[in-house]
Each structure stands twice: as structure tokens, then as C-alpha cells.
Image: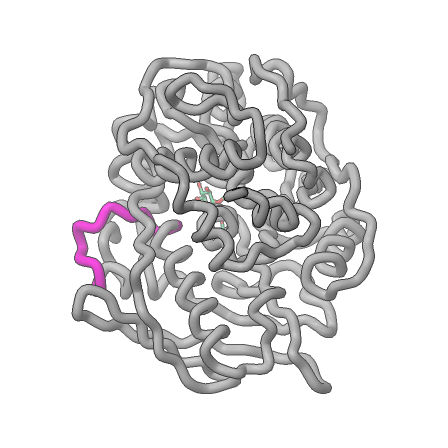
């Protein structure tokens, strides 16, 4: 039977890319998406045409239409056709070509001593989580791929040199494309890194980027978005309702004026987020069943209630597909932005041990944060899919 190859993937933490593609071949994915106002977080278990998601096979197809809607309404198109050549081990030099054009960029790889292959964490800018011994750090200059210098930087950076300044991708999508090319390079060149054990992290604006990369790049084994707030772990709808309740919180309407993290396509939704076909519980849900630890802070601007309730909704998606322990949410009290506090270390260590170091670790029921009732924001319940 067609889907018999799917089921074993839930028992593992990494889905091999060719298997993902084979599964995707059977889904019919719409090209237009509902814009009916809905103040609740959209139901992850109902197709846009109203059919219920009743099996894992359905859910795989649902994931694809959710991604298509996110690309159409907020992220912009995520290109999948680039080809890569690469060389080097500590400086990995990558040439990516598409449509007869090429661009070049490099990442630096700092490896542990001893013999590999080693797992690695791709860090946007520089890691602001402690990367343990035994795990390499791949430093990625994401700003070079897609600039984030305010509204006027739209369409600038190497991604846009390749695809044109008018390409629909927001910066977070351009960066995810860069991560996808790093993965191509790691698969082609023997750098001493095991491409099956690669995580991605970034903080704040780069945390939004790490969340988007974990969602779009299916070869990433572990997402570690840190203090991403609105545009990352927060749900647009909840951020708006928190703002309406008087909080000093970043909203979609504000974000589109501040920077180019999202597609131009998002502009027409940003002041009516209730009309989006999806929300960010589903962006996080795209990472499932792969590893995801969402690291947050209780700074008002990040929207602690929004990130907590939104990621609790995402955890319902993980639970539905039998992967509840593969996603955690660790909030902590208010502390300096992007200064990783000691009270999140246990959760971080557990996720890195399990998903990157292949060790057994307890990642069950990690849901730390301020009180936030997810049931206020949803009008669906999660099925148990098999
Ligand atoms: C949380 O990330 C952003 C935030 O979205 C912006 O509004 C603010 O200007 O910068 C934050 C950030 O990236 O801080 C380093």
C-alpha cells in the first residue's frame, strides 16, 4: 500500500529527504486559500476544502497545503530547484545555481576535537545558546543572503541576486533557502559533519528565521528558535488580541513596517490577521515530527502569552502525530534579551542530547512559561492519527 513506507518515520527523529518527496507526490495541494475571518487559531486537522484529517497520510498532505498557504500569504515562495557545488572543511564555500545564474557564500565550521562525524548547529549570526562539547557550530551570515536593514532592504542580498529583487520571499524565507543550500553542501562534501544531525538556531529576529528554517528545511533535525516573539513562536491572532488588551507587544501591523522579514504578500493580511488561512502554531507544526525546542523570554514585546498559547497549540499537533515528546517550550522569567539563562539549560541539554548527540534523554512534557490558556484561542480538538 502506498503509505506503508510512511509509518516507520514516526519512530525516528529524522525523515530522509527522498522519502518525504515520495510521500508528497500523492497530495493535491491547492493554489488559493481561504480568507474568511476567523478569530480562533485555524484548525490544523481540517483541510481548506473542509475535509477532516483522519490519518497520518492525510496529515502529510495537510502539511503541504499549510506550507503552501504560509508561502502564499506570509513567507513568499521557497525555491526548491537550486544546485550546489561546495568545497572546504573549516570554511565551507558554497556556490548555488538556479535559472542559469549563480551566487556564492561561505560558512565557517568550528568542530569539536577528536574524530567525527559530529552533529552541528547552524547559528544565524552567532550562537547565543551554549553549544555543548561534541557539537560543531556552523556560523551562517544570514544577513548576506537576505538583508534585514529596515523597509528599504527588501529584495537585497545574495538570494535576491540569484532570483531577482522582485522575488516574493521575505528575508526569513531567503535565509531558510540558504540553510537548505548548507545542507546540500554538507551532503556533498565530507566536512566531518553528519548531515542527519544538524540543528538551527538564532535569537530574536534571527529566532524568527530559525523557526522558519526548521519549518521549511525538512533535513533539519532540531529547531532551536530563541526569543523569536511575534513572527516566530507567537501567533499573529493572539499578539493582536494581547495588543487590544493593552499589552506592549509586537503585532503583524507593526512588523511589516519595521523590517522585511516577511513577504510583501503579508502586507494585505497584517492588519486583518484573522483572515490568514493559518497561524504560527502551524508554522511550528511543519517541523513535526522532527525535534523543536522553543526558547522564550517574558519580555512584553515578545508576547509571552502569545508565544506560550501558540506553542501549546503546536504541541497539540505534535501529540496528534504521536510525537509529543519531540517538541518542547521553555519560557523563563524576564531576563536580558538573548542572554541564555541557566533555568533553561536542562531542557536545552535534553533536546540536544536526544536529537543531535543520539543519546537517550527525557524531553517529555516540557511546557514552561507564563500561564496562558490555549483553549481560549482554539475551537478544535486534536485527533490521534495513525
Ligand atoms: C524579537 O526580535 C526583534 C523584534 O521583533 C523587533 O521588533 C526588535 O526591533 O528587534 C528584536 C531583535 O531582533 O532584537 C535583537
User: Is residue 169 found inside the magenta-colored segment of the image?
Assistant: yes
Asked whether residue 320 is in view, the answer is yes
Residue 364 location in percent, x, y? 79, 41
Q: Is residue 37 left or right of residue 44?
A: left
Say how the picture is coloured.
Answer: one colour
Q: Is residue 338 left or right of residue 255?
A: right
User: Looking at the picture, does residue 230 appear above or below residue 210?
Assistant: above
Q: Is residue 14 above or below residue 59?
A: below
Q: Quadrant of the C terminus?
A: top right
- Measured from the top left, where is residue 356 in percent x and y? 68, 63
Give the residues in magenta.
161-172
- Residue closest to the far front: 1
On the question of residue 301 being in view, the answer is no
* Quarter that holds the N terminus: top right
The residue under the point 66% across, 75% down is 118
The x and y percentages for residue 39 are 45, 14
Residue 26 placement (x, y as % from top left): 41, 41
What residue appears at the point 54 percent right and 78 percent down from the top-left corner? 109
Q: Nearer the viewer, residue 9 or 80?
A: 9
Closer to the camera in the image, 236 or 82? 82
Against 31, residue 246 (above or below) is above
Amino acid at each position: 500500500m502506498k503509505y506503508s513506507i510512511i509509518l516507520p518515520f514516526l519512530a525516528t527523529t529524522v525523515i530522509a529527504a527522498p522519502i518525504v518527496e515520495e510521500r508528497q507526490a500523492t497530495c493535491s495541494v491547492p493554489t488559493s486559500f481561504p480568507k474568511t475571518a476567523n478569530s480562533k487559531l485555524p484548525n490544523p486537522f481540517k483541510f481548506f476544502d473542509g475535509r477532516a484529517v483522519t490519518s497520518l497520510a492525510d496529515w502529510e498532505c495537510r502539511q503541504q497545503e499549510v506550507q503552501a498557504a504560509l508561502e502564499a500569504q506570509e513567507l513568499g515562495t521557497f525555491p526548491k530547484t537550486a544546485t550546489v557545488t561546495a568545497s572546504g572543511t573549516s570554511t565551507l564555500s558554497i556556490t548555488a545555481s538556479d535559472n542559469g545564474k549563480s551566487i556564492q557564500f561561505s560558512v565557517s565550521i568550528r568542530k569539536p576535537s577528536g574524530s567525527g562525524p559530529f552533529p552541528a548547529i547552524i547559528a544565524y549570526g552567532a550562537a547565543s545558546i551554549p553549544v555543548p562539547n561534541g557539537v560543531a557550530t556552523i556560523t551562517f551570515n544570514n544577513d548576506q543572503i537576505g538583508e534585514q536593514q529596515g523597509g528599504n532592504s527588501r529584495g537585497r542580498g545574495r538570494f535576491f541576486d540569484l532570483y531577482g529583487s522582485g522575488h516574493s520571499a521575505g528575508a526569513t524565507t531567503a535565509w531558510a533557502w540558504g540553510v537548505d543550500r548548507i545542507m546540500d553542501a554538507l551532503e556533498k562534501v565530507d566536512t566531518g559533519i553528519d548531515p542527519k544531525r544538524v540543528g538551527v538556531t538564532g535569537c530574536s529576529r534571527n529566532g524568527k528565521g530559525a523557526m522558519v528554517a526548521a519549518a521549511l528545511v525538512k533535513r533539519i533535525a532540531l529547531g532551536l528558535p530563541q526569543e523569536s516573539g511575534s513572527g516566530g513562536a507567537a501567533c499573529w491572532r493572539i499578539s493582536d488580541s494581547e495588543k487590544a488588551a493593552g499589552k506592549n507587544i509586537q503585532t503583524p501591523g507593526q512588523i511589516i513596517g519595521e523590517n522585511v522579514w516577511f513577504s510583501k504578500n503579508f502586507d494585505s493580511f497584517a492588519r486583518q490577521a484573522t483572515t490568514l488561512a493559518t497561524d504560527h502554531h502551524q508554522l511550528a507544526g511543519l517541523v513535526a515530527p522532527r525535534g523543536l525546542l522553543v526558547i522564550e523570554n517574558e519580555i512584553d514585546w515578545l508576547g509571552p502569552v502569545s508565544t506560550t498559547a501558540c506553542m501549546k497549540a503546536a504541541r497539540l499537533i505534535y501529540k496528534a502525530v504521536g510525537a509529543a515528546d519531540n517538541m518542547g517550550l521553555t519560557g523563563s522569567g524576564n531576563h536580558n534579551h538573548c542572554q541564555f539563562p541557566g533555568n533553561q539549560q536542562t531542557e536545552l541539554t535534553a533536546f540536544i542530547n536526544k536529537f543531535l548527540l543520539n543519546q537517550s534523554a527525557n524531553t517529555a512534557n516540557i511546557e514552561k512559561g507564563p500561564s496562558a490558556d490555549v483553549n481560549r484561542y482554539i475551537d478544535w480538538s486534536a485527533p490521534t492519527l495513525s
